[in-house]
Image (cartoon, helix red, strand yellow):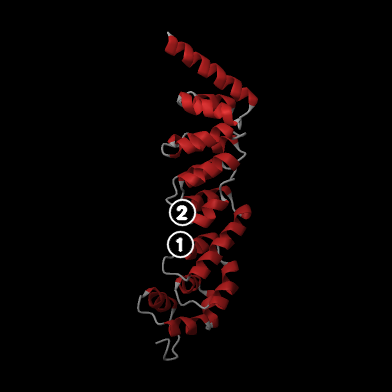
Amino acid sequence: MVLAGETPNEGEAVRLLRSPHCPAQAVEVLADSSWVRGSRAVLVQLLRHPACPRPFAWDVLPHLGWADLLSVAREPRGAPPIRRQAERKLVERLPHMAAGERVALARRAPRRVTAAMLREGEERCVQALLDNPCFTEDDAVRLVASNGHAPCVVAVLRHVRWGRQPAVVSAALRAPAVPLGVALGLAATLPVRELERILAVGEVSEILRDKVRVLLHRRGEGECG
């Protein structure tokens, strides 16, 4: 139909673009059709198609909403340059998104976007980020080390998965945003060798160092007794 010069309706165009047999030439014809820019459904499917023309994508991506950008960024068969551009647009959009929108994005964001959300100040957003399948232990360590919002850092430490990772606990003891009481609770879970390493490295606050010394002294007394 499209290749024959006929103009499909919106539903026909969407079905065509979703088909694994949709030819690249049909994609190019649709991208050149002025009516397509007025159809959100067709526009998104065009951007998700591996044959989507780059100039067309660069022109229309800035005008998409965040949910459509996410759809393009997460499309496995999409052209990598277009997916990356959609991710960049999402990152640019983050400061202007409402808290609820950022929470929804955090649950499903791809790797490049999760990395941009590690300093997020909304606790609900961080909690959603922690359950994102793309979130990694390295992300948890970086979040604890770089996020200056105590509730967000504590959310990581309370997480059933990430809060138990030794690298995360170690990063938390060096993080300024971690409340002293929380840091002491973490220190109490560490073995003597790790506590001695903390004192030797000297990357924690002097107050915490003093508390760790007391903890080590008490453990030594317990062993002697």
- In this picture, residue 208 sits left or right of residue 1: right
Name which quarter of the figure residue 225 lies in: top left
**How many neighbours does mark 2 have within 10 angstroms: few (below 14), some (14-19), or many (20 or more)?**
many
Q: Quadrant for the N terminus, please.
A: bottom left
**How many neighbours does mark 1 have within 10 angstroms: few (below 14), some (14-19), or many (20 or more)?**
some
Please, what is the three-letter code of the amino acid marked with disc 1?
Arg
Q: Which mark is residue 207?
A: none
Mark 2 lies on residue: 108
Q: Position of residue 100 (x, y in %)?
A: 54, 48
Mark 1 lies on residue: 74
Q: Say how many tags the image has.
A: 2
Q: CA distance from mark 2 to mark 1?
A: 9 Å
Residue at 62% of width from left, 39% of height from top?
148
Please, what is the three-letter code of the amino acid marked with disc 2?
Arg
Callout 2: SS: helix
* Camera-side residue of 131 and 202: 202
- In this picture, residue 102 sits left or right of residue 3: right
Q: Work out whether 13 lies above or below 120.
A: below
Mark 2 in CB contact with mark 1 (< 8 angstroms)? yes
